[in-house]
Image (spheres, helix red, strand yellow):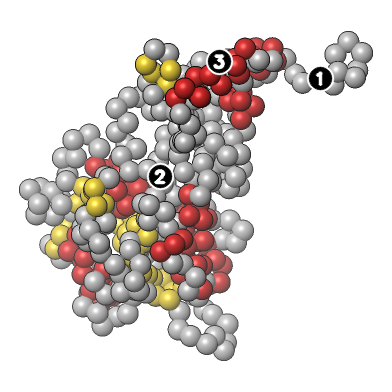
Amino acid sequence: MTYPAGTPTRPLRLIWLQSGGCGGCTLSLLGQQEPDLVTALRAAHVEVLWHPSLSEATGAEARAILDAAADGTQPVDILCLEGSVIHGPNGTGGFHLMAGTGRPMRDMIGAIAAHATHIIAVGSCAAFGGITAGGGNAVEAGGLAYNGTRAGGLLGAGFRARGGLPVINIAGCPIHPGWFVDTILQLAGGTLSAADLDEWERPLAYTSQLVHHGCARNEYYEFKASAEELGDLGCMMENLGCKGTQARADCNTRAWNGSGSCLTGGYPCINCTAPGFEEPGHSFSATPKISGIPIGLPTDMPKAWFVALASLSKAATPRRLKENAARPTPAILPRDRRKEGA
């Protein structure tokens, strides 16, 4: 990567490591648009020292880069981790050794983190343990600064990087590439402070709103016209486990792959930006209820108000929405009443 002549300061040097995960956050990142990823990194004046998918260096050459970062001889401004930290079996870290070294990957992560100016947990696995920590967590997976909702993780409670910030948790499964680019640009501009992070140290740039905001199904939600099966047009909160009214992310106002979101694609929001989302205690596509009332109510909404408003909404549901909600395509279309016979 080259930079324009006369650039006043050296680039921010970034290292990206992968451990217990699927690599989906990297795949999502490669889909960055307007601008593309390379242009975005160039605009942020970021030099990628090493990334397992973007870099040509491999084998001994890659190990030399990482060793220099780990002993502090190679300055690292931004350390990114994708995937959870693997501590198993029995706390040895032996389930994930760094290739060609016999050394637990978690030790390399910790060594570079000790020298890095900023640290970013890329995805919910690196932030909280995520999917890798689910199902009994046989591999003893955890996050950089959290294990689920418990502070600690690999780096310990109260950890601060050399730049003064905690681990920045860009949680999501996977992340939206724009969330990462926004964060990098803020770091490059020196404008990201602790006040720009929420209670889980997620950037407010994407967690200051709910997934519900901008949902294409909001008209159905307003009248509690509910979908009954995946693929139906109606709101998926009442029957299909959608947590869009509780989940914090801008998924429905910042299009994925240039066009949509999980909800636009017909699948309920599973709140993948929150710690512990991987084990909700029920099917992702089923809504747990007590006496017919969903357990997970919209954020900030008292139960009594929800019950009262839901009853009123159902009573006022237009026939068009009631008929269309449990269908994959609309049976009744909107009509202008001024037209005779509408």
Secondary structure under the numbered disc 2 in the rendered image: loop
Q: In this rendering, is residue 20 above or below 62?
A: above
Discs 1, 3 touching: Cβ within 8 Å: no
**Spatial distance from mark 3 to mark 2, Cα to Cα?**
31 Å
Tag 1 secondary structure: loop
Q: Is residue 292 left or right of residue 216?
A: left
Give me the disc on residue 273.
Answer: 2
Q: Which residue is mark 1?
A: 335
Q: Mark 3: few, some, or many residues within 10 Å (few <14, many ≥20)?
A: few
- The disc, 1 or 3, on the residue closer to the chain's N-terminal end is 3
Residue identified by numbered label 3: 311
User: How far apart are the two marked residues, 2 and 1, measured between alpha carbons?
Assistant: 39 Å
- For this view, does 152 lie left or right of residue 36? left
Residue 122 numbered tag: none
Q: Quadrant of residue 135?
A: top left
Amino acid at dot 2: Thr
Tell me residue 259's x, y (percent). Answer: 61, 43
Q: Identify the residue at image location x=37%, y=56%.
A: 201
Residue drawn where x is 33% and y is 61% of the image: 167
Residue 222 placement (x, y as % from top left)? 61, 25
Amino acid under label 3? Ser
Q: Residue drawn at (50%, 34%), measured in percent from left and top?
A: 245
Amino acid at dot 1: Arg
Question: Closer to the camera, 245 or 81?
Answer: 245
Of residue 205 and residue 61, the one placed in the foreground of this image is: 205
